[in-house]
Image: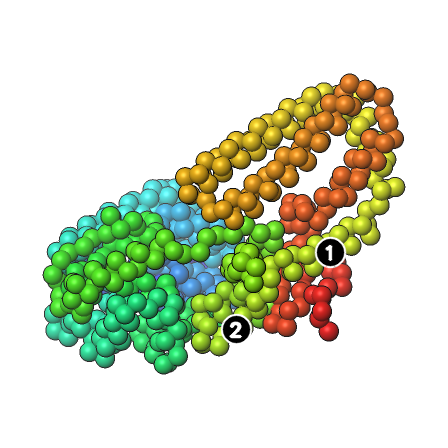
């Protein structure tokens, strides 16, 4: 059906043209020139005014972030266009959900008429061609899905043959100047790779290697390849231990092609999921090695030997709440022995830990206990200024009265007993772990002390409830005990801390900045600060 336009002077048309590599397989009729010729002939016949022509050459129909398409949308938003013309519906898009969104919602809401010449679709008229448009969109989507499967199959076949199909080879290699899907050694970057393996073979850790490269000003792989950085951070352009570790374990450097480490979620999404090593596609002997296999094997053994010597994850009250004021990253904790040989936790800046010699941030080293005590003192002061025993006493009486009128006491007793049983099981398990050597003595002592303290507190609560159940007469003393117990737990209740505190920041000069979830009171200083 040839669309009829009764009042051409009322329209400012946009001619939209799209061609992807997959569409080229349909023949020359889909070419940019052919589409433009067809659209211009239609415009001439109907004496339409063309505002602009929008072309996306080499863009898939499942992607609507095309530059030409987005430019057209911007002009629609600016009310410069009220008519969009394409050769067929698949030129607009092959994702039936997004295509339907633009045809059924976006264009009508912006008073834009859409015409697809070969499909006979014209949203400015009421026709049967418009009624079957959703089915056409689904068929176009199915075509895109089928093409995606074929392309994925071809790529997988190339991977199994050891042909490189990525965008850029790993650091130390470059694309072959004449042979397609083949990589060769990059003579400019190769010395750095060999030096990294040599330093690892000498016993240097990944962090030490990264620090030395940063000190010498060696460009990172991303900087060397001139790759853009989407979100620059405090250590953008610096080598990291994670990058070094990944390189030292990459079989590409011994001549094996390693691909398929990540896969796209679907043909409609650009997001990729990392694959387990057993699902990677590894083909041996596809290119010239940069590192001999013996060196690679020895370095791998050194890395594996360190996996069991890494510091443990420590539990502390302010975990997830405390950050470095200068770089904004969370503070980590390390364990050090004091003069008496006791274990002491210290806060340190994570950025400083990773890039010590780069001078990105400062150490911020301070005892975890010192900071925690200062924060708890402020929280205790704040809570006691808002909560008093006299204010809480009526609430305690009401809770005790309610317990008498309902079966709340029985439920509370059952809950307390369940928690006590769980804590007892945890203690038993910790004792077994200590006997089997799975738990260090200092960790066992710290965790068991905390668990016993919690069990004693719950036992006291259970006893009070049982006494109250036997003697239902409300006693003033019981209400006071309930209030005092709550007041005493203010500074050790992590749930309360998380509810009150949004963020804690530690400055380089050891000042604590507490950002509460409400109006921020005066920030405290550490003991001894000026």
| Residue 251 in the image, given as x and y percentages of width and height | 21, 60
Quarter containing the C terminus = bottom right
Most foreground residue, 482 or 24: 482
Disc 1 and disc 2 in contact, CB within 8 angstroms: no
Q: Where, by quadrant of the figure, is residue 299 drawn?
A: bottom left
- Identify the disc placed on residue 361: 2
Which residue is farthest front?
340
User: Is 26 situated left or right of 14 in this image?
Assistant: left
Q: Where, by quadrant of the figure, is residue 161 drawn?
A: bottom left
User: Is 295 situated left or right of 242 in this image?
Assistant: left
* Residue in the picture at 48% in, 63% down: 76
Position above or below: 421 against 169: above
* Residue in the picture at 54% in, 65% down: 348
Position above or below: 460 against 449: above
Q: Secondary structure at mark 1?
A: helix
Circle nearer the N terminus (1, 2): 2
Which residue is farthest top?
470
Identify the residue under disc 1. 377
Q: What whole-number distance in Å separates the C-alpha atoms at marks 1 and 2?
A: 28 Å
User: Is 322 situated left or right of 273 in this image?
Assistant: right
* Residue in the picture at 34% in, 47% down: 137
Most foreground residue, 62 or 458: 458
Observer-side mark, 1 or 2, equals: 1
């Amino acid at each position: 059906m040839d669309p009829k336009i009764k009042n051409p002077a009322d329209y400012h048309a946009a001619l939209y043209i799209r061609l992807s590599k997959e569409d080229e397989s349909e023949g020359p009729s889909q070419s940019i020139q052919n589409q433009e010729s067809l659209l211009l002939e239609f415009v001439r016949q109907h004496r339409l005014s063309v505002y602009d022509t929008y072309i996306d050459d080499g863009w898939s129909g499942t992607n609507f972030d095309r530059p030409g398409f987005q430019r057209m949308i911007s002009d629609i938003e600016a009310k410069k266009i009220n008519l969009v013309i394409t050769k067929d519906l698949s030129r607009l898009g092959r994702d039936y959900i997004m295509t339907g969104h633009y045809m059924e919602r976006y264009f009508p809401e912006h008073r834009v008429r859409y015409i697809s010449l070969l499909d006979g679709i014209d949203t400015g008229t009421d026709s049967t061609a418009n009624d079957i448009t959703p089915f056409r969109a689904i068929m176009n989507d199915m075509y895109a899905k089928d093409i995606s499967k074929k392309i994925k199959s071809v790529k997988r076949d190339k991977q199994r043959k050891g042909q490189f199909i990525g965008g850029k080879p790993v650091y130390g290699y470059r694309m072959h100047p004449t042979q397609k899907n083949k990589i060769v050694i990059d003579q400019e970057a190769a010395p750095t790779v060999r030096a990294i393996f040599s330093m690892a073979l000498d016993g240097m850790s990944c962090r030490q290697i990264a620090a030395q490269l940063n000190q010498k000003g060696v460009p990172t792989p991303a900087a060397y390849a001139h790759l853009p950085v989407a979100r620059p951070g405090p250590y953008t352009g610096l080598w990291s231990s994670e990058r070094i570790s990944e390189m030292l374990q990459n079989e590409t450097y011994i001549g094996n092609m390693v691909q398929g480490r990540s896969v796209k979620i679907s043909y409609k999404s650009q997001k990729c999921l990392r694959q387990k090593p057993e699902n990677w596609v590894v083909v041996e002997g596809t290119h010239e090695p940069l590192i001999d296999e013996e060196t690679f094997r020895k370095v791998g053994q050194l890395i594996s030997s360190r996996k069991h010597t890494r510091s443990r994850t420590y539990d502390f009250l302010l975990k997830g709440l405390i950050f470095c004021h200068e770089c904004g990253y969370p503070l980590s904790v390390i364990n050090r022995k004091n003069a008496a040989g006791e274990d002491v936790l210290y806060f340190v800046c994570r950025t400083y830990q990773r890039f010590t010699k780069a001078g990105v941030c400062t150490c911020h080293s301070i005892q975890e206990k010192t900071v925690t005590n200062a924060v708890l003192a402020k929280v205790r002061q704040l809570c006691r200024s808002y909560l008093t025993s006299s204010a809480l006493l009526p609430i305690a009486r009401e809770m005790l009265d309610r317990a008498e009128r309902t079966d709340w006491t029985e439920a509370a007793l059952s809950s307390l007993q369940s928690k006590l049983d769980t804590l007892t099981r945890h203690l038993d398990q910790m004792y077994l772990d200590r006997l089997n050597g799975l738990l260090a003595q200092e960790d066992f002592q710290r965790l068991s002390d905390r668990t016993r303290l919690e069990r004693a507190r719950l036992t006291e609560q259970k006893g009070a409830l049982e006494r109250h159940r036997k003697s239902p007469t409300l006693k003033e003393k019981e209400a006071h005990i309930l209030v005092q117990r709550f007041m005493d737990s203010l500074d050790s209740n992590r749930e309360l801390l998380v509810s009150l505190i949004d963020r804690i920041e530690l400055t380089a000069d050891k000042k604590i900045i507490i950002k509460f979830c409400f109006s921020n009171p005066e920030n405290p200083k550490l003991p001894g600060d000026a």
